[in-house]
Image: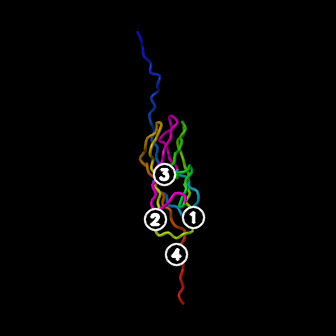
Amino acid sequence: MVTACDDEETINPVSIQFTTANLTVSEAAGEQTVNLTLASAAPADATIEINIENTNVTYGTDYTTNPNGSSGKVTVAITKGQTSAQFKFTPVNNNLLASEVKTVTFTVGVVTGPIENGTTASFIVTITDDEGPSAVNFE
């Protein structure tokens, strides 16, 4: 009698999502931490690719990220056992008056490893201008 053994352990994926769906910051706010939460501890190492969509903003001129997102993507590594992950977002204080609404949308994209999208797969940052219109006096 021969009995076959399965040496490969089945790993069930866990979901990842942004901890909140929206954030509004002044362009002078400084570095912000963007948090992602896993439903439980990561069962293995994984990589999350976060896609970036710009509306009335330009990477490097209006904001930056760490890790660098100038390619339109931020890659976040997750180590086995982690229950959360983060990356940094920093608005740039440009000292210019802007009339349009500036937003950056981050969306969980390609995932390698045992991770899947949760319910809050997108995170929208609205950057508000900290300059006001100039006062004009007529005499």
Residue depth check, mark 3 versus mark 1: number of the one nearer the observer: 3
**Marking on residue 93:** 1
Disc 3 to disc 1, C-alpha distance: 21 Å
Is 54 magenta? The answer is yes
**Marking on residue 101:** 2
Residue located 49% across and 49% down the image: 73
Asked if the residue at tag 2 contacts the one at tag 3, i.e. Cβ–Cβ closer than 8 Å, the answer is no
Residue located 55% across and 53% down the image: 65
Mark 2 residue element: loop
Disc 2 to disc 4, C-alpha distance: 16 Å
Q: Could you tell me residue 22's position as x and y percent?
A: 46, 56
Q: Amino acid at mark 3?
A: Gly
The mark nearer the N terminus, 1 or 2, is 1
Chain part drawn in magenta: 35-60
Disc 4 to disc 1, C-alpha distance: 16 Å
Asked if the residue at tag 4 contacts the one at tag 3, i.e. Cβ–Cβ closer than 8 Å, the answer is no
**Marking on residue 72:** 3
Residue depth check, mark 3 versus mark 4: number of the one nearer the observer: 3
The mark nearer the N terminus, 3 or 4, is 3
Q: Amino acid at mark 2?
A: Val
Q: Quadrant of the N terminus?
A: top left
Q: Please name the colour scheme applied to the rendered image.
A: rainbow
Q: Could you tell me residue 97's position as x and y percent?
A: 52, 70
Q: Which residue is mark 4?
A: 133
The mark nearer the N terminus, 3 or 1, is 3
